[in-house]
Each structure stands twice: as structure tokens, then as C-alpha cells.
């Protein structure tokens, strides 16, 4: 009889530790997602808008240039066109990433409720946790891409806006 009690206790502890493990894994996923969202929230769309508006402003000035501008000016303009090439991609990916954050939050919340209500069979829990981990890895890759594009746009704007404006004012009529 004592052996059955010890065996029963060991089985209960095993089941509880698995349950705690799964809950901890879910909490870890939520923490990772919140951390990524913190990085996402550091992106300042106002800075992006200033860079795009500045680009449009300078582009209007450049259109009035004649064909005989310096090679330095042409080189700077070519570097400055990074904004034109990446601004639409950035805002599209930024908006998609924002939606992906909302979807993943809802997904983790639903998974937590399903685990609490024991709606997922024990042998399937790991599958769902792995699936959500993959989703968060995709979001992590997306945030890296969006941050890289954002930083490139802001960097190009900060370094070239004034130079292009000055050269355009001096060389274009």
C-alpha cells in the first residue's frame, strides 16, 4: 500500500511538473513577444515621416536642376535615393508587423486559456508551443528587417538632407 502511495505521488509530481513546464514555456514566449514589441515601439514614425517629407521637398528642388551639375551632387543624390527605394517597403512591413504582433498576442492568450481549461491533449501541447515559438521567431526576423530599413532611412536623411537641400538651392534654378 505504501508503495502505491509513493508511486501515486511521483506520478502527480510528474504531471504537475509537466504542466508547470508548459506554463513556464508559455510565459517565456509571452516575455519574448513583449520584448520584441518594446523594440518595435521604439520606431518613431514621426522621424520616418520627417525623412520622407524632406525627401519629397528636396526632390522638387532637384527637378529644376539642369544637366550640368557636379559629380559630387549626382553621387549624393544617388545615395539619397535609398529613401525612395525603401520608404514604401518600410511602411508596408511596419504595418504587417503591427498586425502580426496583435495576432500573436491573441494566439498566446488563446493558448493560455486552452491550457488552463485542459482543452489540448497532453501529447499535443509541445506541438502548439513549438508552433508559437516559430511564429515569434518570424516576428523577430521581421522586426530586424523593419528596424534595419528604418535606421537606413533615418541615417540617410540625417546625413544628406541638408547637403542635398543646400546643393539644390545653389545649383538648381
Image (tube, grey):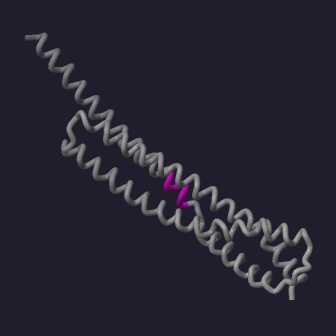
Q: With 145 as the anchor, is 169 left or right in this view?
A: right
Task: Estimate the x, y position of residue 126 in percent, counting from the top left.
Answer: 31, 36
Query: Which one is nearer the viewer's eye here, 70 or 67?
Result: 67
Query: Which one is nearer the viewer's eye here, 47 or 84?
Result: 84
Query: Farthest residue toward the left?
Result: 1
Residue at horizontal 28 percent and vertical 38 percent from the top: 125
Q: With 63 as the anchor, is 31 left or right in this view?
A: left
Q: Majority secondary structure of the magenta segment?
A: helix
Task: Estimate the x, y position of residue 160 in percent, counting from the top left.
Answer: 79, 69
Q: Is residue 97 above or below residue 127?
A: below
Q: With 10 as the anchor, is 134 left or right in this view?
A: right
Query: Which one is nearer the viewer's eye here, 149 or 18?
Result: 149
Which quadrant: the N terminus?
top left
Task: Estimate the x, y position of residue 141 in percent, counting from the top left.
Answer: 53, 49
Residue 151: in magenta span: no
Q: Is residue 64 above or below residue 130?
A: below
Magenta segment: 36-41
Residue 39: in magenta span: yes
Residue at horizontal 24 percent and vertical 24 percent from the top: 14
Answer with the quarter of the image where residue 43 lies. Answer: bottom right
Task: Estimate the x, y position of residue 71 in percent, counting from the top left.
Answer: 90, 69
Residue at horizontal 84 percent and vertical 83 percent from the top: 65
Which quadrant: the C terminus?
bottom right
Amino acid at each position: 500500500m505504501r508503495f502505491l502511495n509513493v508511486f501515486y505521488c511521483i506520478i502527480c509530481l510528474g504531471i504537475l511538473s509537466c504542466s508547470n513546464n508548459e506554463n513556464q514555456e508559455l510565459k517565456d514566449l509571452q516575455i519574448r513577444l513583449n520584448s520584441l514589441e518594446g523594440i518595435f515601439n521604439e520606431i518613431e514614425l514621426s522621424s520616418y515621416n520627417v525623412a520622407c517629407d524632406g525627401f519629397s521637398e528636396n526632390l522638387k528642388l532637384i527637378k529644376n536642376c539642369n544637366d550640368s551639375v557636379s559629380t559630387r551632387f549626382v553621387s549624393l543624390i544617388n545615395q539619397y535615393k535609398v529613401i525612395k527605394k525603401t520608404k514604401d517597403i518600410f511602411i508596408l512591413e511596419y504595418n504587417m508587423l503591427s498586425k502580426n504582433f496583435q495576432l500573436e498576442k491573441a494566439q498566446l492568450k488563446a493558448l493560455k486559456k486552452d491550457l488552463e481549461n485542459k482543452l489540448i491533449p497532453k501529447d499535443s501541447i509541445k506541438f502548439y508551443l513549438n508552433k508559437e515559438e516559430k511564429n515569434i521567431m518570424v516576428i523577430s526576423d521581421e522586426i530586424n528587417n523593419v528596424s534595419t530599413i528604418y535606421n537606413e532611412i533615418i541615417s540617410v536623411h540625417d546625413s544628406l538632407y541638408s547637403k542635398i537641400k543646400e546643393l539644390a538651392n545653389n545649383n538648381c534654378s
